[in-house]
Amino acid sequence: MKFVLRFVLSLCVLYGAQGCVSHNQLLMMQQQANLETSPPPTPPVYKIKALDNLMIKINAFDGSTQEFLNREFGVSEQANGQLNFNPESVYYVSYIVDSEGYLDLPIIGKLKANGLSTWELRDSLNLALKPHMELASTQVKLANLRVTVLGEVESPGLQYMYNDKNNLLEMIGQAGDMTDFADRTRIQVIRQTETGTSSAYVDLSSPLALHSPYYYLMPGDVVYVEPIKPKAFDVSSTSLGVFFSAVTAATLIINLVLELRSNP
């Protein structure tokens, strides 16, 4: 009988130890590192690729031509002159780069966009519009500015970026921060490059993460926050609880039977 009780107690202690999350596992940037000796990384410049969505707006002094082009480019304006934009309508009001890397635009025709930054494409558009309108000025924005954040965060899913340089901490914060079961030493970033898919782990427990080439995110990145080992015990806590309840009940029944036998 004592053996059974000790066995149940040992299981409870083991489960409690495995299911605990230490204070250090919840901290970020906790290690000491001298960052003054190395400059921070430069945020990467995104290059337009096939199937990207682009918002293009024409500004000019020629009102009639400007209105025509903006209508043809799928750009509408509100009464206050602000661009009418929301993520749900991106697909319908933006231009899509074709599989060969070209935009098919009104008046201009086909224009290469693949491999250019939005600033470089803007310059190409201004040059192409010169024969058709005076003092043309275009605005080019990448419409698919989004990152997918998965794993141990409060609100996993698509996170939209409205900044030219967005870092890993900002996107995790936008996803509601990490849960208590997130492994802050293994944040995986998956990225599509010209040569294929690349991935790397970023250790947010160290300030050296600020110097990782994956600290600044690119549109289309996937961020996966891995769980720590106690997560598995937390997930199975229901079944383990049922098991311990059954063992405890069986132990009490055996104890009651032994007492009845010893005291007839």
Image: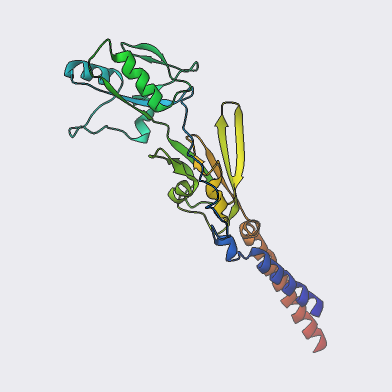
Q: In which quadrant of the rendered view does residue 252 lie?
A: bottom right
- Is residue 224 rendered to the left or right of residue 261? left
- Is residue 147 rendered to the left or right of residue 251? left
**What residue sits 72% from the left and 74% below the top?**
9
In percent of width and height, residue 165 lies at 43, 40
How many circles with numbers are drawn on the protein? Answer: 0
264 above or below 92?
below
178 above or below 101?
below
Residue farthest to the front, as pictured:
37
In percent of width and height, residue 38 lies at 55, 48
Q: Quadrant of the N terminus?
A: bottom right
Pick the residue in front: 73 or 150.
73
Pick the residue in front: 244 or 32.
32
Q: Quadrant of the C terminus?
A: bottom right
Can residue 184 be seen at all in this image of the molecule? yes
- Is residue 217 rendered to the left or right of residue 77? right
Pick the residue in front: 134 or 8.
134
- Is residue 71 rendered to the left or right of residue 144? left
Q: In which quadrant of the rendered view does residue 31 lie?
A: bottom right
**What residue sits 23% from the left and 29% below the top?**
77
- Give the colouring mode of the picture: rainbow
Residue farthest to the bottom, as pictured:
263
Q: In which quadrant of the rendered view does residue 26 lie?
A: bottom right
Can residue 151 be seen at all in this image of the molecule? no
In percent of width and height, residue 233 lies at 65, 59
In percent of width and height, residue 159 lies at 44, 42
Pick the residue in front: 18 or 182.
182
161 above or below 21?
above
**What residue sits 25% from the left and 19% below the top?**
136
